[in-house]
């Protein structure tokens, strides 16, 4: 177990080299004709412009928090926070760079070589993000652990600060990106599809570039930061519990080890070891997937999502006993992996099968019934995933206590590299379709990119299911780590342990308080999208009005996409401040004013409401989107694209857009941020 | 305090006499012309037909539960359950009888004597329900307490069983009535307003009678059962805590009383005493309100809702010190009363002011943005009410511990008689408007009934705010009572006390499990409305198709409303079974399989999600409804009734209908039912 830090840094480095190879391969592929290259350049420049302006805002935020943490908890805390944040930004930068190179090359591959080549290009483009997320996560955590392994005072603070750095970048990137992508999408659609009656991705529409930029900043950079933070937070929660749980609870991890120091070393190192194992298996999986591009994409991607976590359990079964680690660890790990698979399949069902057809049929009686049905599908879809998480929690807790729950979260995230690859594949192929349409490539090419895009929609929903499921388990583990940390500090200061009694009025009021927070984040992100979309609508209308011949498509009448990109960027960055601040400040304010009990209650309340609301939003949004596509593909004979029934389905999709891509992810990050921030400030409020 | 049972029975009896006088007065008023009388007869018969068929279903349910309770907990439990259930049914019967007499007489009063007379008639009609709910509640609780005051074994079981009786009737009446009213409303609107393009309440539409019946069975019988159960459950929670809390916690209630038996007598009697006081004050308020009908209805009704609870505190301040009861009781009571007022005002704001205008403006860009904005308003509206409840909880807990929270709930419900009167006034005036339209009374008369109806919409939303707020406080108190009861039984059986630790995996998993339940009830009630509405749409279409001359309005072409009423009744009664069974069986199954910890967690999770979801649904629904009305009244110049903007607002209203009248109330009852059922089964699962 002494070699674990080295193993994880090494695995991370291999992943980064792999990412570099994929990057080089993608960048050397042909870009297609000059029109395609021009469009791709607009998208790439818009995406990078957003990222650089977002990073400037985040630099200010990071500087403030760095000073505050250094003052309150020492320079090690401040630096770890910066490291956690910086690596997240780096992963986002590399990943988006690759994705914005791969989109046009995917379109060109579809044109020149057909579907398998296009699938491979999109997967390689997404793979850079997947490998960077896991690789940089492991390098960061491994380095930190290697340096401070033996310092039981600094290590926990540094781990928690690292996680807070990762979380807060994830929060802003996800909310800012989410607002951008949906504002651009809704804005472009309102003027383009509804008012001017021109098709989606029509080159005359000045908002189309911003829409495609949005896919990158929201679904690639934002999603990457989100998954990176889950990955880090799950490891941190498990390691924190390994440091603070009583020996009696940790003993079943390695029944043969009787020395406390060694036992804790195993318990703290195990999450890193298992994640390294997961990354190795995922890399093998990615290599194999590259040889399967001739098979139907839907099956390949589903297998890529579900197989690797299970493989990790198998490999673990072969290796772990050699270190004296018990089979109970495998059970917890396996429960997490299988649970993730079940959640993925259930999400798949709700967003692509029977329920989607039911929503399409409800559109027959108008948009009202479509929306009602979609919301009902969303609420119903909460049940199996949360029951599954209950089962995972019970099983892993039965064998290894709360540490087991943290390991289950690690197990669920073992396949992070490949999950993120498949997630990033989606927007790359979506972009490819947009470029093909704008550059006027033929219908047969558009058909290929459409198929790749449709698969991406479903895998995106599955990825979101994973993300929320692992977030819930991670928060449960963080919760336990918070309580342990509080009592650790209290005992050290000769105070009695604090029992968080569910029948304590402070806890009960905390629960009510916490349950409000996801609602505030949900409401503010939804209205933010509305406001930002409004600004975009105004500008697109202005361009159609003031640029002669634009709407008629006369040669020489060029739209000004950069103006729209700029408006969307400014609006998204402005609108992300309020919900972001709520998420980060709420636990701090509650903790310092109300003390650890109220904060614990607030975490529990936010967890309950956040888990349900974000699942409702993600799944209802996915289902509405696919119900619209179902009708467009002729699923409702007699009601094709443009019919009243289709229009009703578009209304549901419009509601679902901010649901699934802005508010839902924002709420799911909120609960993780609350968890890590609480854990970090636990020593400061423990004595209250 | 020995006279408390007698006082409460006496107060209840006076209320029933008052109700009888109002009933006689209303029934002697003229019914108007034969056409009005005929329509009113249809509505009355339809309502009573629903009630009698519903009661038959409930009789079977009650018989089964009676046998089960008698077998498990003794005949006293079974009989108390029946009493709680029977009195709820009785209140529903009287109240609906009065309301279905008052509707047509309100229309006739508007025609013959003008607005003040119409307002008075509608208020008197609603007053019967208000007085029956509070009066029968007090008579039942008082009688039970009078008979078993000194039997510390039987009394708690009987109180809990009585509350379960009240709850389960509330559950089925609210869900069944909610499905009926919205299925009929949506069904009649889809064919009438959308397809056949005829106005609301047009006599040619065969669904209009069912729509008006729905107002009675949902908003009168259903709402009455709901409020009756809150009223009973709040008292039961406080009394249960008075019986089981440690003396040290109860001592501040009456610091001068050193004898435990007397102290408990005071603590147990106080809720009944305060509720009796509340009923007396409410009755005075109702008498005074009858003299104020010449003032603007909106102000009169708002004052009627907010003043009585505050008056109770004043009267309490004069009386309580004489019994040795401390001022702390007044603070808890006052916190509840003021909190209820704040929640009422906030609800009023969100459903009639700025947010409504924002939703109307969002309709400019179509139904999608209207729906998004409405959902955001709903989520935002959760914050102040729940923060207010936190403050109420902190304050009342600070002075009197968890008993204080229960008293705050009693304080919030002190004005039940008048709150329910104002609530029932709404559907009576809504019906009056429908009858005026169908009978072809002039536009000036319709203007009066429209104004009364609009005020009713807002007060209905305020009433729902009260209902949910008091439900949340009551559940918190029930939660504490559950824990006390479990430990009481454990200690009696020489087992160690059970500490509900928030960091126990069983509790955490319970929270996740419980947070799913409101989603299931929400999803199943929303789809139930859709299915039931579909059946009604089919039948209305059939009648328009097969009855010659009906759609053209030819003389002699009569619709067959009774067929629609029958279909709606059958569908509603069938559809209420699943969500109702979930609510009642979930705590039983969880408790017996998972034990008290998992059940406690499930209660907390259901509370967090249920409180937020039901508030979101109630307030978003009210706001959408009023945004539509705002546009209809010319609030958006250039976009009148029938414009695209208005159509977009109608979509939001369609979504809001099941939100506010079916799923939202269903979820709010779910958490109360879970609370009382848990309390009842606590002794049976305490030893697990």
Image: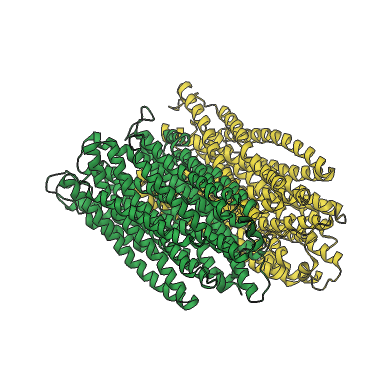
Chain colours: A green, B yellow
The correct choice, above or below, for A77 with respect to A664 in the image is: below
- x then y, percent, for residue A189: 30, 46
Q: Residue at x 36, y 39 (%)?
A: A454
- x then y, percent, for residue A151: 52, 72
Q: Nearer the viewer, residue A229 or A492?
A: A492
Query: Is there any visible trace of residue B387 in the rendered image?
Result: no
The correct choice, above or below, for B522 with respect to B53 in the image is: below
Q: Nearer the viewer, residue A396 or A366?
A: A396
Q: How many marks?
A: 0
- x then y, percent, for residue A653: 39, 43
The correct choice, above or below, for A664 with respect to A359 in the image is: below
Q: Residue at x 40, y 69 (%)?
A: A82
- The quadrant of the rendering that contains the C terminus of chain A is bottom right
In the picture, residue A637 is in which quadrant?
top left
Specify the farthest residue to the front.
A322
Question: Is A270 placed left or right of A397 in the picture?
Answer: left
Specify the farthest residue to the bottom.
A71
- x then y, percent, for residue B239: 77, 58
Question: Is B94 placed left or right of B545 in the picture?
Answer: right
In the picture, residue A298 is in which quadrant?
top left
Q: Nearer the viewer, residue A501 or A564?
A: A501
The correct choice, above or below, for A106 with respect to B268 in the image is: above
Query: Is there any visible trace of residue B38 in the rendered image?
Result: yes
């Amino acid at each position: 177990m002494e070699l674990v830090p080295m193993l994880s840094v090494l695995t991370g480095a291999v992943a980064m080299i792999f990412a570099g190879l994929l990057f080089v391969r993608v960048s050397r592929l042909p870009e297609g004709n000059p029109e395609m290259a021009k469009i791709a350049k607009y998208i790439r420049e818009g995406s990078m412009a957003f990222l650089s302006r977002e990073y400037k805002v985040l630099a200010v935020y990071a500087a403030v928090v760095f000073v505050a943490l250094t003052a309150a908890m020492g320079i090690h805390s401040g630096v770890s926070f910066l490291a956690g944040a910086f690596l997240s930004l780096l992963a986002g930068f590399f990943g988006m760079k690759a994705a914005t190179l791969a989109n046009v090359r995917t379109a060109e591959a579809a044109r020149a070589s057909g579907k398998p080549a296009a699938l491979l290009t999109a997967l390689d483009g997404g793979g850079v993000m997947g490998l960077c997320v896991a690789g940089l996560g492991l390098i960061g955590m491994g380095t930190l652990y290697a340096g401070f392994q033996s310092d039981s005072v600094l290590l926990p603070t540094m781990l928690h600060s690292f996680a807070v750095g990762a979380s807060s970048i994830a929060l802003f990137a996800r909310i800012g990106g989410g607002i951008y992508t949906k504002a651009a999408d809704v804005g472009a659609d309102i003027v383009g599809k509804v008012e001017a009656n021109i098709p989606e991705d029509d080159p005359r529409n000045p908002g189309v570039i911003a829409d495609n930029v949005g896919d990158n900043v929201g679904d690639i950079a934002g999603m990457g930061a989100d998954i990176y933070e889950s990955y880090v937070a799950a490891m941190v929660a498990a390691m924190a519990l390994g440091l603070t749980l009583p020996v009696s609870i940790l003993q079943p991890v390695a029944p043969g080890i009787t020395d406390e120091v060694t036992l804790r070393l195993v318990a703290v190192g195990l999450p890193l070891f298992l994640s390294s194992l997961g990354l190795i298996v995922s890399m093998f999986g990615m290599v194999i997937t590259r040889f399967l591009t001739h098979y139907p994409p839907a099956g390949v991607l589903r297998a890529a999502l579900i197989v690797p976590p299970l493989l990790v359990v198998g490999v673990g079964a072969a290796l772990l006993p050699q270190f004296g680690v018990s089979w109970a660890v495998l059970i917890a790990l396996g429960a997490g992996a299988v649970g993730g698979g079940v959640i993925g399949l259930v999400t798949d069902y709700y967003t692509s099968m029977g329920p989607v057809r039911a929503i399409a049929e409800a559109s027959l009686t108008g948009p009202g019934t479509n929306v009602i049905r979609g919301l009902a599908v969303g609420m119903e879809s909460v049940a199996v995933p949360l029951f599954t998480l209950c089962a995972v929690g019970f099983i892993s807790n039965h064998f290894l206590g709360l540490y087991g729950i943290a390991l289950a979260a690690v197990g669920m995230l073992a396949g992070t590299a490949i999950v993120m690859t498949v997630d990033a594949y989606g927007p790359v192929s979506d972009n490819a379709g947009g470029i093909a349409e704008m550059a006027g490539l033929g219908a047969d090419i558009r058909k290929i990119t459409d198929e790749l895009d449709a698969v991406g929609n479903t895998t995106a929903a599955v990825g979101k299911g994973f993300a929320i499921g692992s977030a819930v388990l991670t928060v449960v583990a963080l919760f336990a780590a918070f309580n342990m940390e509080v009592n650790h500090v209290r005992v050290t200061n000769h105070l009695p342990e604090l029992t968080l009694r569910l029948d304590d009025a402070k806890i009960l009021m905390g629960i009510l308080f916490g349950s409000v927070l996801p609602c505030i984040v949900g409401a503010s992100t939804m209205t933010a999208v509305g406001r930002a979309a409004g600004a975009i609508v105004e500008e697109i209308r202005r361009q159609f009005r003031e640029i002669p011949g634009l709407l008629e498509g006369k040669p020489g009448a060029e739209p000004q996409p950069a103006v729209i990109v700029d408006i969307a960027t400014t609006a998204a960055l402005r609108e992300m401040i309020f919900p972001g601040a709520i998420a980060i400040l709420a636990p701090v304010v509650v903790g310092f004013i109300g003390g650890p009990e109220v904060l614990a209650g607030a975490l529990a309340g936010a967890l309950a409401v956040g888990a349900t609301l974000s699942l409702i939003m993600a799944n209802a949004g996915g289902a509405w989107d696919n119900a619209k596509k179902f009708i467009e593909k002729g699923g409702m004979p007699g009601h094709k694209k443009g019919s009243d029934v289709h229009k009703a389905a578009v209304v549901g999709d419009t509601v679902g857009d901010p649901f699934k891509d802005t508010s839902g992810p924002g709420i799911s990050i909120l609960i993780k941020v609350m968890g890590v921030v609480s854990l970090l400030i636990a020593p400061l409020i423990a004595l209250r």
